[in-house]
Image (cartoon, grey):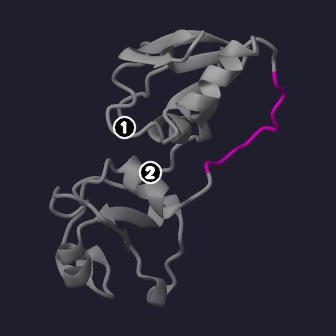
Amino acid sequence: MRDTLVLNASFEPLSTVTWNRAVVLVLQDKAVVEMVHPDQRVRAALVDVPVPRVIRLCRYVRVPFRRRAPWSRRGVLVRDQHRCAYCGGRGTTVDHVVPRSQGGADTWLNTVACCAADNHRKADRTPEEAGMPLLRQPFEPTPSDAMLLSLGRGGTEDLPEWLALPAA
């Protein structure tokens, strides 16, 4: 699971990595630990370190500017916190607001998390045609927000306030 956030030397989010990779970067002096998981440690014969939650690279890494977060089914489920956009229950599938058969595309603004029952009930219709209003409108996360959201369930509550996501 990729649950360690990597910050550039300028404190901007770069990516998420496994905690194993984060520990290696810290032990090689390529990164410093900004925040740790409470009560979790990595122990070996000569090493006993806390598991990093957020690390910052020691050297600045130039990355090409990315305007948009890439769309993915997993990204939509994470963005909507696995909550159905129609009933508020557990969302396990992705529904197209405008069905693909009617010209709807795989985009952030046309897809929402949905439970299987509501996805089947809505079928090949728009929410208006099916009489199923959306509880919240889909939105397109910024690349950094998508990265922070990818930390998963309970991922952003423990982050420092200067790094936390704005309320959507």
Residue 57: image x %, image y %?
Answer: 72, 17
* Above or below for 6 versus 116: above
Residue drawn at x 65%, y 48% is 68
Which stretch did the figure color magenta?
61-69
Q: Is residue 74 above or below residue 127?
A: above
Task: Check disc 1 and report the residue beneath it.
Answer: 168
| Residue assigned mark 2 | 139
- Which residue is more in the foreground, 101 or 5? 5
Element under label 2? loop
The spot of residue 124 in percent (x, y) is 33, 88
Q: Residue at x 48, y 42 (%)?
A: 1
Pointer 1 with pointer 2, Cβ within 8 A: yes
The structure residue drawn at horizontal position 31% and vertical position 85%, both measured from the top left corner, is 125
In the rendered structure, the answer to whether residue 66 lies left or right of residue 71 reads right
Q: CA distance from mark 1 to mark 2?
A: 9 Å
Q: Is residue 97 visible?
A: yes
Q: Position of residue 58 (x, y in %)?
A: 76, 11
- In the rendered view of the protein, which quadrant contains the C terminus? top left
* Amino acid beneath label 1: Ala
